[in-house]
Amino acid sequence: MLATDFASLPLSPGALAALEVLGFERLLPVQAQTLPDILAGRDVLARADTGSGKTLAFGLGVLAALKPPLHVQALVLCPTRELAEQVAQELRRLACRTPNVKVLCLCGGLPFAPQRASLKQGAHVLVGTPGRVHEHLRKGSVSLAQLKVLVLDEADRMLDMGFEPQLAMVLEHVPRERQTLLFSATYPPAIAELSRSYQRDALHVDVPTPALASSADEPARATNVTHAFHRVAAHQRLAALARWLGHHRPGSTLVFCNTRSECEAVSSELRALGWVAASIHGELSQRERQHVQRLFAGGSCSVLVATDVAARGWDLADLQAVVSFGLARDPTVHVHRVGRTGRLGRAGLVVNLVSAEDAAALAALERASGQATFAELPPPSAEPPPRPPNVTLLLNAGKDKKLRPADILGALTAEGGLAGADVGAIHIDDSTSYVAVSAGCAERALGLLRERKVKGRAVRARRAGLELRKPGSAGQH
């Protein structure tokens, strides 16, 4: 019989206390099916959709395996920097009631020397991308000789992105006697081969993906996600998207397009119709992509239009809707798109705008997931687009000033300040910080930050706009 609550598992008092603080009470299916074996030290291969709660499953296993000596005992490999940073942050949250646990993130796109300096101070858990972890191994700045647990997160994406050579080189440095946990949203033959190469007597777990077909008004079976398929002519897809958005009015929508130019055109047209919308694609710099992502995650941008490549590795906790502005050509990409909403039991909406040019993609999707049920578009709405609930503020201090989210929260909510409920997501980057506040409190929040010090120092703050200002331009700091 599967466990249903965390207290029934052999978890440490610190882990149980952290779960209580974070509000986790009952196990989700992927956790119930894998955690007992993970905690027992067995290798596990789990296929589970994005957002199913797998990070918590392997995270608790990683923390349970740690011992006091400060050396690398666990390694989590992820396909993207964004996912690695999110996983590292989640592990730190899970360790918030366990003393002296050090988690270090090693990703490409960031300076190498500071990472090497941090490694000299020691770490229990490394989270990183295969290329950067291999670079540290090659240059001798880290040793995996005493590794106990290896986690391959979103392994299918790592293979799709061509990381197999780097992955093989990293695994040459890990002990043969170890626990290997492999998580994947899809189960292509390459994943089975990966398991055979690197795991021993692995428990295979498959958390079912809900059936594809579901009408626009009928809740999708065995899930909190409602699916809809609409047939539209290619030249009418934008009008159909605007009609769907106007009817459902989700607070946050991620629209997937297949090309950069389509992303730009769709976001531009939505802005012209009154939506607060932005686009993100591979031709933007890492800094530009991160800026837009912070605004969207903070609730100050209602619609984000993205390519699949640009959105890789994102973990958006409460994304209300996903739209395919034309079907993904690969059914596994469709699975990743759908998995971004309805996470951790929350409600979600998925709509697919299908044109004649999507015939081949539709056939492939139906072969993989079952027959799609088409429905009429909802009636148009006469209401103007809703305004985002939050405004995101940009501060001119970050990790370079050793700023923490609690420092910003304290400055805003100290006596006479904002209510805690009016402060949303806070992200601390290298030299800047983002804080979301309720739209009606934005001017007051800016005033508080002008009057008060944050961690003993004055900071400058402004509203973060959708257009990223160039360094040195007016108002940039």
Image (spheres, rainbow, N blue to C red):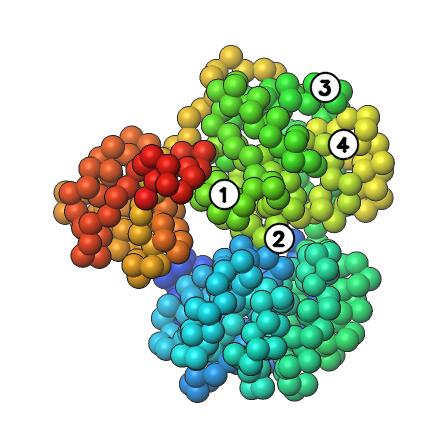
Q: Which disc is residue 288 wearing? A: 1
* Nearest the eye: 352 or 160: 160
Q: CA distance from mark 4 to mark 3?
A: 22 Å
Q: CA distance from mark 1 to mark 3?
A: 30 Å
Task: For marks 1 and 3, give the one nearer the viewer.
Answer: 1
Residue appearing at x 52%, y 33% in the figure: 278
Q: In this figure, which residue is indicated by the disc labeled 2?
A: 50
- Image quadrant where one finds the C terminus: top left
Q: In this figure, which residue is indicated by the disc labeled 3?
A: 235
Residue appearing at x 45%, y 33% in the figure: 467
- Image quadrant where one finds the N terminus: bottom right
Mark 4 and mark 2 residues within 8 Å of each other at the beta carbon: no
- Element on which disc 1 rests: helix
Q: Earlier in the sequence, mark 2 or mark 3?
A: 2
Residue type highlighted by circle 2: Thr
Residue type highlighted by circle 3: His
* Nearest the eye: 171 or 477: 477
